[in-house]
Amino acid sequence: EPREVKDGRMYFEDLDQDFNGFNMASVCSLLNYLHSCLRPPIDRSSLSPVTSALCCLCQGNRNIRRFLRQEILPPLHTVMHRPEEGMSLKSKLVRLMTATSYGAEEVVAEFLFILCKENADRLIKHTGYGNAAGLLLSHGLLGGGRRRSKEAEYSSDSDDSDTEEYEKSKENIDMVTGGPSVELADNPLDHMTDEEKEREAEELHRLIKKMEGQGIIKMVSLDSQGNPIVPREEPIPVSVAGPSGAKSDQATASNSDQDD
């Protein structure tokens, strides 16, 4: 039976349970359970409790936080896609940061925030500003910075230095999405001949007239200032039936009598 793979490594029994001389067997069990909760269909009832437990462990033990960060948020290299794209554990958690249908977006975002030493800039680097905006707003960190946590004390940032590949590609990363920047596409008209442009213009004119005939759009003229000139609609005559109509009938009958 094939197992799920993250960044070339397998979960479950294949996790190295020794980290810096500490036995991480129980932490591995929780991490494996979290990973199983994220497999479709997502286990909503268990997702928040196991993520909350991991948050407490990370805040209470520096080695556990480092171990989980190594497994979930490894150092970035060349960024080829957005953080939420893919099937890694990190991608699944980042997707949940903005997925309100599961009711775990806050605790998942908090978990990733703790893995980043509650540093807003580092969280944005790993998840993108758009995915992290909700959590940063709740902590007043939209402008960056670090939250002063009473539950945990973090070491210096020396162990979180960027890789050489990430430093080279940093200029091409969109920090809002956390993925590669989208370059402006070339204008397709630049690669068309005059005959092709004329055919495209005729086809566009035909489609516009078709939509106007179906009542989808309405063509108007523009004045000298570029404002649309809306034609005045003629009032629709309405026939009124009532006392006046009855009087009119009586007058017609009276005239007929006089003629006789």
Image: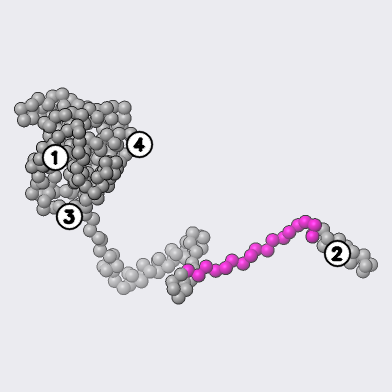
Reading the image, the residue beneath label 4 is: 101
Amino acid bearing label 3: Asn
**Position of residue 125 measured from the top left corner of the image (x, y, whole percent):** 18, 46
Identify the disc placed on residue 252.
2
Of labels 2 and 3, earlier in sequence is 3
Amino acid bearing label 4: Ser
Residue 220 relative to residue 257: left or right = left
Of labels 3 and 1, earlier in sequence is 1
Residue 68 relative to residue 255: left or right = left
Quarter assignment of residue 24 = top left
> Which residue shows up at 65% across the image and 63% down it?
236
Q: Can the viewer see residue 248 in this picture? A: yes
Mark 4 or 2: in front is: 4
Tag 4 near tag 3, CB within 8 Å = no
The overriding secondary structure of the stretch rendered in magenta is: loop
Task: State how far apart marks 3 and 1 are (Cα).
Answer: 20 Å
> Which residue shows up at 32% across the image and 69% down it?
196
> Which residue shows up at 14% across the image and 29% down it?
61
Task: State how far apart marks 2 and 1 are (Cα).
Answer: 97 Å
Tag 3 near tag 1, CB within 8 Å = no
